[in-house]
Image (cartoon, helix red, strand yellow):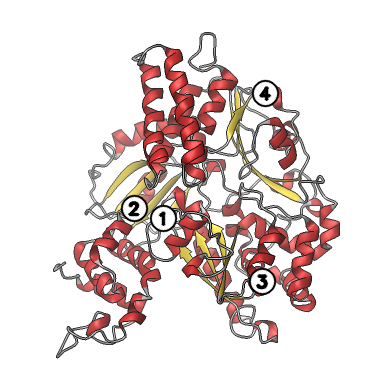
Amino acid sequence: MDAPPSEEERTAIDAHLGLPEDGWSGGEREGDTHRVARSGRAEREQRHLLIEALHVLQAEIGWISPGGMNYVCRRLSVPPAEAFGVASFYAMFATEERPKTVVHVCDDLACRVLGARELCAELETTVGPEGTESPQGGATWHRSPCLGMCEQAPAILAQRAGRADVALGGATAASVAAVIAPGSTMTCAGADTAPQTWEQSTRAELRLLRRIGHADPLSIDDYRSNGGYEALYRALEIGPEATIAEVKDAKLMGRGGAAFPTGVKWEAVATQPAHPHYYVCNADESEPGTFKDRLIMELDPFAVVESLTIAGVTTGCEQGYIYIRGEYPLATERLRNAIDEARRHGFLGPDIMGRGITFDIELRRGAGAYICGEETALFNSLEGKRGEPRNKPPFPVQRGLFGKPTGINNVETLINVLEVLRIGGAAYAELGSEGSTGPRLFCLSGHIARPGVYETEHGATLGEVIAMAGGPTNGIKAILLGGAAGGFVGADRLDVPLTFEDARAGGYTLGSGVIMVFGEDTDLVDTILRIARFFRDESCGQCVPCRVGTVRQEEAIHRMIAGRTIGSMADELLLLDDIAKVMRDASICGLGQTAASAVQSAISTFGLFREGGAA
């Protein structure tokens, strides 16, 4: 491309990447440097910096211009066609000029039933139609999928060029106006809301959340005075093999939905002969209804840094990454501070706690792609590519990030390791049930008295956890377990235990810990249509079963709602069943494999579209 960057774009990129050394790395080309690739391989190996560089451009001028992209491509030796393919893949990036402030208004499941539609209607009047510039200029708004603030519905995220992004819960037309005002200095710093976690019991009974609301999330000294870095000290004292043994003895299962044994994964990474090894914290929490990881990152960020450090040094890694959801500006700010403070105090870097052990962490932001919660899509994103899943095998422990052995866990799984090392693996295994050990976090939202994150041991019943949050506010028509990729159950299932083994036997799922309650006046047909639209939009499009199936699923629901079926209603339901089977059996990754789960469960549980069924 020939388009030149503006001076502000050039300055922003140079500040982020460092000044170019020669014409090959983005400087002015003189002499024969246009014919000779000086250090070309080293430049090409900077490809993993592409997405962060695009974030810099977006934050500077509000979109990714041809000139700005061209300059990034020269600096990183990335072909412009590839860079455009990456930029256009992620929802938070704009490749066409738009107002400098863009407000994303969540109209997904929890927000949809708690005021988002009314807020959007009011914004149509006060700001203007969706996607158009406001009368005051410089701002626009769009409907958005889940922003991970379901306990504070309705929620918004404002991307503001030249100013900090802001995520706000309990949004109103007035708060939107305050965010988009030209002189607004509003930030996320005061956005903490008091979660209900410590109202359920005394703080002494909390394990994963015992510091939430008690320790200052910005102070490493406060963190240490509340037990911080004791687990890392113990891991270094007993060594990697004993640490892995403790995690295996604890029978700790992953908390991201797949429920893979954590100790087995750690051991597999540690014993791989290829080097280097990498460890990744998957903080791209984008399952609708899930917000537990966000709360931990915002209010106990040092726990995330410490637990990832333990995972890294135990599995023979020198480099770790936290891949955080792009819609989490406050969590991003808090984690950056925690990483900097940990490095400054000797808990990260070339000589951790004076032991001669090297491990460091980089924080990388996603850019609005649900699919990047899938581990191999996340690796591609970290490498500066489109977030498309990879085929398995090889598995990440063998060939993951940058083609090297890689371990990956989500935030909740990692912080459980702190508790394992605090009380010992055997004692941890005594908590919960035989097949589901330890404490578990659940995200309660929707028509519930006190939405928030709640901690309990595995084995509590669904009804007991709902009671911890104050119970339903308008009866119970349906409960969504596991998020949009999970399934619906009725009020007759309140006695089911929340364990992995009971979920498998009972045909329901725990997923990422979502418990979303829908009151008696909820339109379930509208709810499943929103889920179908979500998966249609979020499919990466790489494989045909998912790319086509998610579209056909939504189309069939639209036809049934409108009464314009192809054949009878029963024929359409059979078609939906067929689509679901193909997506489940033939899709590359979990998105396509579960894209029909909630829709199918709602239809079968409540008889939607059948005579006498719920609406």
| Label 1 neighbour load within 10 Å: few <14, some 14-19, many 20+ | many
Taking depth in this image into account, of 514 and 244 the one nearest to the observer is: 244
The answer to whether residue 523 shows anywhere in this view is no
Q: Observer-nearest residue: 27 or 24?
A: 24
Q: Earlier in the sequence, mark 1 or mark 2?
A: 2
State the CA–CA distance, disc 3 to disc 1. 28 Å
- The residue that label 2 is drawn on is 89
**Tag 3–tag 2 contact (CB < 8 Å):** no
- Quick one: which residue is furthest to the bottom in this view? 31
Amino acid type at image mark 4: Ala
Which one is in front in this view, the residue at disc 3 or the one at disc 2? 3
Q: Do the residues labelled 1 and 2 touch (CB within 8 Å)?
A: yes
Residue 175 point in image, percent of width and height = 41, 45
Of marks 2 and 4, the one in the foreground: 2
Sequence order check, earlier mark of 2 and 4:
2
Above or below — where is 504 with respect to 493?
A: below
Residue nearer the viewer, 37 or 484: 37
Can you identify the residue that label 4 sits on?
491
Kind of residue indicated by mark 1: Gly
What's the distance in space between the residues labelled 2 and 4, CA to CA?
Answer: 40 Å
Q: Mark 1 points at which residue?
A: 387
The residue under label 3 is: 271
> Compared to 478, does 206 lie above or below?
below
The alpha-carbon separation of the residues under discs 3 and 4 comes to 47 Å
| Left/right of residue 438 with respect to residue 411 in the rendered view | right
- Residue in the picture at 34% in, 80% down: 41
Q: In which quarter of the image is residue 467?
A: top right
Residue 149 locus on image (x, y percent): 52, 45
The amino acid type found where label 2 is placed reads Phe
> Looking at the image, is mark 4 or mark 1 nearer the viewer?
1
